[in-house]
Amino acid sequence: MAGEAEVSTTPTIVNRFPFEPHIADMPPQQQYVIRNLWNAVFDAQSAIPILKTQIDANKSAISTTNETVNNNSSSETIIQVVGSDYGTVNNQTGNTVYATAQSDAGGFVILSDASPIAVTLTAAPVITIPWACSFLNLGAGTATLTPASGTISYYGHIAAASMPIIQGFYSIVAFDGTNFWADSLPIATSLTFGAVKPDNSTITIAGGVISAVGGGGSALDFSQGFMLMGG
């Protein structure tokens, strides 16, 4: 019909259609559609093994890359978040001997006794990093932290064999896989901190000791890494 676009009845590839006798009596337009649908299905099926080969090649390349990355050596230590033991309290009041455990990581170990307290800092392989915990000494007996292996370093003492914690002090101790590192600070109270620099006092330094005269007194013992307060 004049003015209408002529619809081609020739499929893209007709020699791949195996059912020509079955559509011979159909209108040309329907034959055209069926042939092209068949060709599309045939093309999709033909592409599957090609795509699979490409995917397998990409998987192999990714695997090779991962192996190369994993085999690279690095001195970096990956620090992970302490697990479910974070925030625990291990009350050792009344005990004069204690050895730390992996479960102390992220928690508080409470020490309190009138006699000296011997604390063994258990090391690798029993303790694995990351590992750090806090020690609070509430008793009159001095608690001495001694690494089972390696050393402990704190203010004024690098690679020491042990570290004391006197009454009223706490210490945070961390393990790097070989040695221990710590600090030791007084437990904050208004009484102790009010005596550091009273009004009208004179502070002098002699022999590594800081003294306050007049209105109160205080001393800083650098050899032990802790502060002694007095009123």
Image: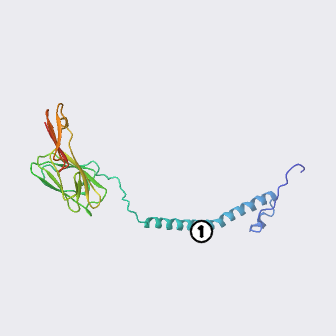
Q: Is residue 156 visible?
A: yes
The image quadrant of residue 38 is bottom right
Three-letter code, disc 1: Thr
Image point (78%, 59%), residue name: 32
Left or right, 204 with respect to 177, comes to left
Residue lying at the far left of the rendered structure: 115
Q: Badge 1, how many Cα within 10 Å: few under 14, some, many 20+?
A: few
Task: From this view, report whether residue 99 is shown above or below residue 91.
Answer: below
Image point (19%, 47%), residue name: 226
Q: Residue 208 at x, y = what percent?
A: 17, 47
The image quadrant of residue 150 is bottom left
Which residue in the protein does label 1 denote? Answer: 53
Q: Residue 230 at x, y = what percent?
A: 13, 39
Q: Residue 29 at x, y = what percent?
A: 80, 57
Q: Residue 154 at x, y = what percent?
A: 23, 53
Q: How many marks?
A: 1
> Dot 1 lies on which element?
helix
- What kind of colouring is applied to the model shown? rainbow
Q: Quadrant of the C terminus?
A: top left
Image point (18%, 42%), residue name: 205
Task: From this view, report whether residue 99 is shown above or below residue 196.
Answer: below
Please state which of residues 58 and 4 is positioned toward the viewer in this rendering: 58
Residue lying at the far top of the rendered structure: 200
Q: Is residue 191 visible?
A: no
Please state which of residues 113 and 220 is positioned toward the viewer in this rendering: 220
